[in-house]
């Protein structure tokens, strides 16, 4: 616990400079050469990742700050801002800041090797994007990680795994949800070594669907080995990182003999088994949500975020995040550092501000469609008359929280962390640390809000639970929604066919 107090000072530095630097935020993201600092939408992944442009930016940016993370006086403000934004991009793509536990590289490679028919080369079949520029062959959004928990070379997901995606027109964009990413299956597969080490009597206690799933993995793995491929010593893999597993409250107990092995709680296994590409439980497997029936969440698009605490305090924006709600983008990003490192050491302006500055300047891609100007204008009028009351933010998001009944969204999403109880020491630590960041929202406000509507033309999983496939599905243009229990059904019945057409045209311009 002393750990928490020790870092309290660091936190107040963050809160302090959070206001002090607002003049820096208002500097343009266009540098003096007239070019944006980064290029985030493009025809190829290399164009969008621009690794060569960003790879040294953090070193440069940090060298321009003093020990209190304030800019050195002689630094040119334009250059500082360019470096800051590029550093933010590098952190977003290349740093394991996403808050999952690291995975030993041996395990990561073993999964790729064991189930090629499910995983594909570079994890492509699980929806990871192949990284044309990564020398070690890791896909986009997987980076080398700290060895601090595993004691061996490890990897972890970065923001880019979920938040860099391909648009319906084929382009790639940072901030687009990776709707192909099957994180749930990735999670399940990464627990296979535990299954392999389990006694059969313990296996029988698994939820039936989980047992079927792991049995199938075991069968294909055996077929592969019988076919002459090299086998993997799974129990050796488990033992190698058993310390980490025990911290998480799973894995072999009674080391060194490993009398029995426990899997993640049934609710985690069930939520992964129900997950689908792009839609999953973002809390698992670390700080699992304990309300049993919380639906899985879709990945939001990250365009048009403001997230200033002053706006939140004056009621101009809703909190960021649904599972845990934060008053500002800085606090949201800081929580990611806590989840990833389990202390506040990285919660410093020099890490937090570049990521926040980078995200704030991401713009939504334009729809390539030729839209009728008249339809768009009429759509805007209808939107102002019928939708703006709730979609009142500058990017069509809600500035307030609503009861789930307003749109018949699943009520468990109103407050997914209510009654949270950490079940392991590490979860307790993370929970306490991140609560410091959400202190002004304690207890957490209950309710849901619409996410931003910018770039919504490019989405394939609308609504928080991702249950509406696109704008046509939203308005039931093809008669019935694909998932009939999805929220906001009123948009199918309460709007005329002509209004639907115009609203779609308008929404495509956002
Ligand atoms: C494993 C996939 C995944 C990774 C990795 C990930 N995110 Fe997210 N992100 C999500 C999901 C799912 C949500 C919705 C969660 C919610 O609303 O509670 C989300 C929400 C957000 C939001 C809030 C947007 C809003 O409208 O409320 C921001 C900002 C964000 N992520 C930024 C980041 C950053 C920065 C990183 C890296 C530090 C990151 N994400 C890593 C999946 C991911
Ligand atoms: C009573 C308040 C209210 C009104 C009026 C309203 N909405 Fe919503 N809308 C919401 C809320 C709350 C959500 C979030 C629901 C969810 O994600 O489950 C939402 C979600 C949405 C989404 C999905 C956003 C996303 O992130 O995927 C779209 C699109 C949308 N609304 C369009 C409209 C349109 C078009 C109208 C007018 C015809 C309208 N809404 C009227 C409250 C409202």
Image (cartoon, rainbow, N blue to C red):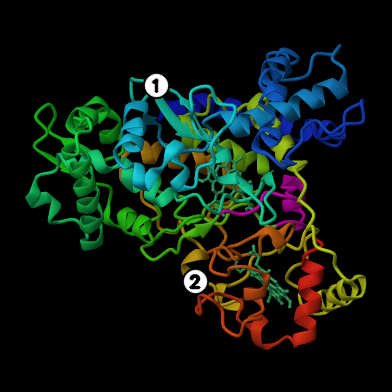
Q: Is residue 224 magenta?
A: no
Pointer 1: what residue? 147
Left or right of 139 on screen, residue 288: left
Q: Is residue 411 visible?
A: yes
Q: Nearer the viewer, residue 3 or 159?
A: 159
For the residue labelled by badge 2, is the local secondary structure a helix, a strand or a loop?
loop
Is any part of residue 285 visible from this angle?
A: no
Camera-near label (2 vs 1) is: 1
Q: How many marks?
A: 2
Residue at image location 66% in from the left, 52% down from the top:
167
Q: Quadrant of the C terminus?
A: bottom right
Q: What x and y, as percent, mark residue 2?
A: 42, 26
Give the farthest residue toward the front.
Answer: 227
Q: Position of residue 76 (x, y in %)?
A: 87, 17
Q: Which mark, residue 337?
A: none
Image position, residue 439 (x, y; %): 57, 45
Helix, strand or loop at disc 1?
loop
Disc 2 and disc 1 in contact, CB within 8 angstroms: no
Of 46 and 19, nearer the camera is 46
Within 10 angstroms of label 1, few (less than 14), some, or many (20 or more) residues? some
Main SS, magenta residues = loop
Q: From what the image shows, is residue 489 above or below residue 158?
A: below
- Where residue 164 sits, quadrant-wise, is top right
Beta carbon of the mark 2 residue lies under 8 A of ligand 2: yes
Q: Is residue 471 left or right of residue 266?
A: right
What's drawn in magenta, residue-wise?
Answer: 299-317
**Label 2 packing within 10 angstroms: few (<14), some (14-19), many (20+):** some
**Quarter of the image where one finds residue 389:** bottom right
Q: CA distance from mark 2 to mark 1?
A: 39 Å
Residue at 36% across, 63% down: 292
Q: For residue 410, which numbered disc appears in the image? A: 2
Q: Nearer the viewer, residue 226 or 139?
A: 226
């Amino acid at each position: 616990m002393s750990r928490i107090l020790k870092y309290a000072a660091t936190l107040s530095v963050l809160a302090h400079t959070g206001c002090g630097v607002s003049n820096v935020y208002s500097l343009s993201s266009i540098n003096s050469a007239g070019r944006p600092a980064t290029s985030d939408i493009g025809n190829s992944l290399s164009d969008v990742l621009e690794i060569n442009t960003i790879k040294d930016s953090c070193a440069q940016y940090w060298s321009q700050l003093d020990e209190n993370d304030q800019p050195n006086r002689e630094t040119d403000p334009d250059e500082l801002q360019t470096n800051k934004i590029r550093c933010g991009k590098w952190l977003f793509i290349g740093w394991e800041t996403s808050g999952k536990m690291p995975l030993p590289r041996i395990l990561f490679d073993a999964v790729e090797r064991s189930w090629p028919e499910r995983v594909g080369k570079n994890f492509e079949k699980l929806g990871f994007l192949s990284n044309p520029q990564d020398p070690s062959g890791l896909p986009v959004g997987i980076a080398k990680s700290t060895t601090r928990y595993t004691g061996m070379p490890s990897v972890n997901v970065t923001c880019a795994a979920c938040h860099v995606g391909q648009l319906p027109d084929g382009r790639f964009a940072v901030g687009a949800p990776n709707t192909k990413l099957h994180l749930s299956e990735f999670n399940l597969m990464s627990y296979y070594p535990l299954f392999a080490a389990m006694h059969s009597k313990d296996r029988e206690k698994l939820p039936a669907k989980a047992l079927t799933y792991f049995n199938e993995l075991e069968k294909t793995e055996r077929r592969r080995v019988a076919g002459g491929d090299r086998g993997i010593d799974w129990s050796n893999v488990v033992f190698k990182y058993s310390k980490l597993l025990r911290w998480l409250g799973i894995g072999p107990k009674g080391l060194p003999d490993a009398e029995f092995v426990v899997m993640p709680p049934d609710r985690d296994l069930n939520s992964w088994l129900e997950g689908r590409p792009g839609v999953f439980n973002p809390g698992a497997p670390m700080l699992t949500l304990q309300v049993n029936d919380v639906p899985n969440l879709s990945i939001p698009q990250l365009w048009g975020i403001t997230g200033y605490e002053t706006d939140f305090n004056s009621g101009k924006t809703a909190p960021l995040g649904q599972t845990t709600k934060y008053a500002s983008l800085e606090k949201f990003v800081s929580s990611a550092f806590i989840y990833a490192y389990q202390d506040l050491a990285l919660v410093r302006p020099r890490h937090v501000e570049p990521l926040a500055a980078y995200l704030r300047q991401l713009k939504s891609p334009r729809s390539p469609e030729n839209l009728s100007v008249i339809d768009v204008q009429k759509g805007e009028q209808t939107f102002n008359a019928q939708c703006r009351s709730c979609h009142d933010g500058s990017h069509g998001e809600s500035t307030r929280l609503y009861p789930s009944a307003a749109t018949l969204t699943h009520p468990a999403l109103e407050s997914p962390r209510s009654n949270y109880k950490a079940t392991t020491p590490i979860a307790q630590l993370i929970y306490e640390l991140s609560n410091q960041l959400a202190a002004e929202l304690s207890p957490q406000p209950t309710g849901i809000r619409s996410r931003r509507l910018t770039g919504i033309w490019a989405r394939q999983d609308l609504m928080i639970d991702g249950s509406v496939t696109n704008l046509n599905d939203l308005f039931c243009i093809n008669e019935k929604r694909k998932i009939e229990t999805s929220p906001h059904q009123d948009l199918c019945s309460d709007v005329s066919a002509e209004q639907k057409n115009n609203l779609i045209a308008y929404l495509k311009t956002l």
